[in-house]
Amino acid sequence: MPETKKFLYVNRKAPYGTIYALEALEVVLIGAAFEQDVSLAFLDDGVYQITKGQDTKGIGMKNFSPTYKALGDYDVNKIYVEQESLDARGLTLDDLLPLTWEDEDDDWAEKDSIKVISAAEMAKIMEQSDVVFSF
Amino acid sequence: MALEVGGKNIETDEEGYLENRDEWDIDIAKAIAVAENLEMSDSHWEVVNFLREYYEEYQIAPAVRVLTKAIGKKLGKDKGNSKYLYELFPYGPAKQACKIAGLPKPTGCV
């Protein structure tokens, strides 16, 4: 077995208007095939990527937010959201998509993927990652 | 490229995937299957329908590993393995079944 590395994908931009959010999601899904230890971080305007009730009709773009719900199927179940970024935008955990994963070793119990953490804790997670991709 | 179904021309890309997912219907699926040299059985349709439902919910076609796991969970362990799926779709379950289901090529599928 090759050594498993800790990958962290950092998402800082709003979902539409630039291609960063969609590209990041695609890279995560493709990268998931390599069975590395993958985490996602959402901060700054990036927290809007995983908000509920996105409606893109007015801008003529595909609403790709349902795809975040597939992350659990791809064994991507460590999703960190920065508390300060939510606070600054008047958002709470309830405004975010209920992202979950099923634990095969626990009779397929459904578990939450999202952890809301402080900026200081986020810094630690970045520090502990082997590879950080910033989008 | 185009596919002729019931006197209508259906646009596909150079690999045979539908250009417009909304045009899909059962006759188009059958025509794609013929082009792929596949004889569709109930087991084939089961996978194709599963993929369409998955796409509807998540807006992506799942990678093979994800498809295998999800099929196993929904249709039973005896079907949730790559041997079963490759027997149905010899050129790759995600690739061939997605094409027949009128979906884009799975993300990360090479």
Image (tube, coloured by chain):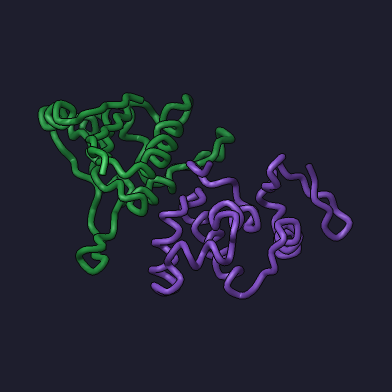
Chain colours: A green, B purple
Return the residue nearer the eye: B23 or B48.
Answer: B48
Return the residue nearer the eye: A108 or A49.
Answer: A108
Give the mark count.
0
Which of the 4 image quadrants contains residue A10? top left
The x, y position of residue B69, in whole percent, is 39, 61
Q: On the rendered image, what quadrant is the N terminus of chain B found in?
A: top right
Q: Residue furthest front?
A: A1
Q: Is residue A106 above or below residue A83?
A: below
Return the residue nearer the eye: B106 or A101.
Answer: B106
Q: Is residue A16 left or right of residue A1?
A: right
The x, y position of residue B15, in whole percent, is 68, 43
Q: Is residue B82 above or below residue A116?
A: below
Q: Residue at x 61, y 55 (%)?
A: B96
Q: Residue at x 20, y 65 (%)?
A: A106
Which of the 4 image quadrants contains residue A88? top left
Q: Residue at x 45, y 34 (%)?
A: A22
Q: Residue at x 45, y 58 (%)?
A: B67
The x, y position of residue A104, in whole percent, is 26, 63
Q: Is residue A100 above or below residue B27?
A: above
The x, y position of residue B89, in whole percent, is 59, 61
Q: Is residue A19 left or right of residue A41?
A: right
